[in-house]
Amino acid sequence: MQARQARIESALDRVLPAADIAPQRLHEAMRYAVLGGGKRIRPLLAYAGGEATGAPFEAADRVGAAVELIHVYSLVHDDLPCMDDDVLRRGKPTVHVQYDEATALLVGDSLQSLAFGVLAGVSLPDAAVLVDMLARLATAAGSRGMAGGQAVDLDSLGKPLSLPELEFMHVHKTGALIRASVLLGAQCGTASDPARLEALDRYAKCIGLAFQVVDDVLDATASTATLGKTAGKDADANKPTYVSVLGVEAARRFAGELLDEALGSLDKLDGQGERLAQLGRFIVTREF
Amino acid sequence: MQARQARIESALDRVLPAADIAPQRLHEAMRYAVLGGGKRIRPLLAYAGGEATGAPFEAADRVGAAVELIHVYSLVHDDLPCMDDDVLRRGKPTVHVQYDEATALLVGDSLQSLAFGVLAGVSLPDAAVLVDMLARLATAAGSRGMAGGQAVDLDSLGKPLSLPELEFMHVHKTGALIRASVLLGAQCGTASDPARLEALDRYAKCIGLAFQVVDDVLDATASTATLGKTAGKDADANKPTYVSVLGVEAARRFAGELLDEALGSLDKLDGQGERLAQLGRFIVTREF
């Protein structure tokens, strides 16, 4: 996992504009936001998805970088004063604290554009598959995916949510991009077999939701120092979470059930899902 | 021109999610931001670029919608309090005034994703051309294009800029997307002839810069009612513009020279650049 994390760090470093290219301050802030932090869960899932279909590493590098750029853009915007108003991210001051709000806005905007540019640079034998991948990323990031989940999240502050409403929010906010990470990685390989892609998709859906359930648990139980971001924020903001709806223990059990379902769906991959299984276990048992 | 504007309005209406699809408030705000306003210069340029290369109208519809979505996202973010802090756009309250800041942020973010999704949906015989177009849009929108120009704009407030610095800013902030609009439209047709594409590119570069020069002149000379956005903002913000650097008359002359150069480059299109010529004249002589 550490080797893969180093590999994606290097891929991100390569695709980000150098800090001495104009506009320098923006490029420096983009690099500050992206490099040197984060678990890189989404790129790891992209690599593992690619491994399950024999994708070349070079393609998975770009897919991993693209999904991480989308993820980081969402963090930078989410931390802005008009959203979660947070000062700490990945153990460092957030971008608007380190630079300023306008720069943080443009950093997020530019990272989103860059993500599509990086993905468009993947070299695949069939360009039509790549077009389909670009459309998938757009859907996962947009108003019917991640950004839509954020909007529901905003509207839900201080409101009690039912379990289905909470699931809708998280399936969009976190799940859509995590799911896309696995599938985009897999699309770089030779997985034309629909049963195989369906198994991957089911894995990805379960892991995407499990990731968020565990995030909710950690927000309630771990320290700011361990997380590298402000802990206890959800309760402070009176935000509905799996912990507020189910309680810590039941939320943990739910994450375990989702993991079991995800691992079960990997049976159809003839042993090529080992890395996905490892990552799934890591995502659910992680402590930060 | 009005028929084309009606056509792009209808294309935008089709590609935007319906306001009754969840998350409803976000989708309603996206429609509020995009529909019913604007000169639609970029889509008009995409249609005209497509006409110069025999592109199908259906492809140009999507290209036009995509570039307009990028443009509108940039306006929504640009109007935010941490940027230009403006309350009026296209004759209506800006999105953060009508809704709230967080929603305006997510509207812009979602429109950017949607733009790439809409462009990925263009139907072309060669998918590799479409991948190239998606990469072009990403570059035009990102830190080395439009968003980069915004960053330079921010950094330049209150500073005297030389003419080359001013040109760098505008070539990025406005020019990059205008240039991409023409070329993306043209790429949907059969313009594989490099001399033809080069002529279009030269036209697009000149018109992109001319557009901004005229914008600077209008900001200094037209009324808020005519513009549908706050007039006199540049001087109030002590922002370097072509008017502050050259004066109104010389700026007007410069726009005229750029138009002449743009029109001259159309000679190479064997009469297929008539619509581009009309649009160029409109852009430079417009009064709003």
Image (cartoon, coloured by chain):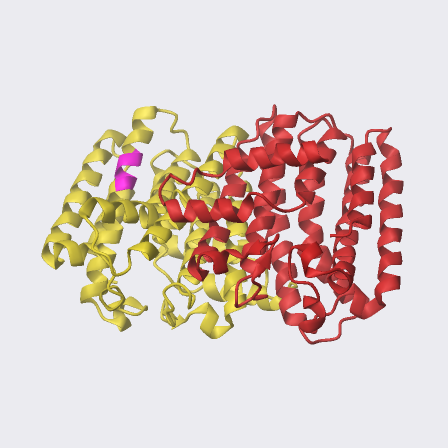
Chain colours: A red, B yellow
A195 within the magenta span? no
The residue drawn where x is 22% and y is 55% is B214
Please determine whether, in this image, residue B219 is positioned above or below residue A257: below
- Quick check: can you spot residue B257? yes
- Quick check: can you spot residue A273? no
Please determine whether, in this image, residue A17 is positioned above or below residue B147: above
Please determine whether, in this image, residue A119 is positioned above or below residue A70: above
How many discs appear?
0
| Quadrant (top left/top right/bottom left/bottom right) for the C terminus of chain B | bottom left
Q: Nearer the viewer, residue B236 or B66?
A: B236
Can you name the residue that lies furthest to the front here?
A225
The residue drawn where x is 70% and y is 47% is A178
Please determine whether, in this image, residue B112 is positioned above or below residue B138: below
Residue A96 placed where, x, y %?
48, 59
Residue B19 placed where, x, y %?
59, 65
The image quarter containing residue A272 is: top right
The residue drawn where x is 53% and y is 32% is A121
Left-right relation of A204 to A142: right
Residue range in magenta is B200-205
Left-right relation of B199 to B163: right
Magenta span: predominant SS is helix
Residue B277 placed where, x, y %?
24, 43
Can you name the residue that lies furthest to the left here?
B249
The image quarter containing residue B27 is: bottom right
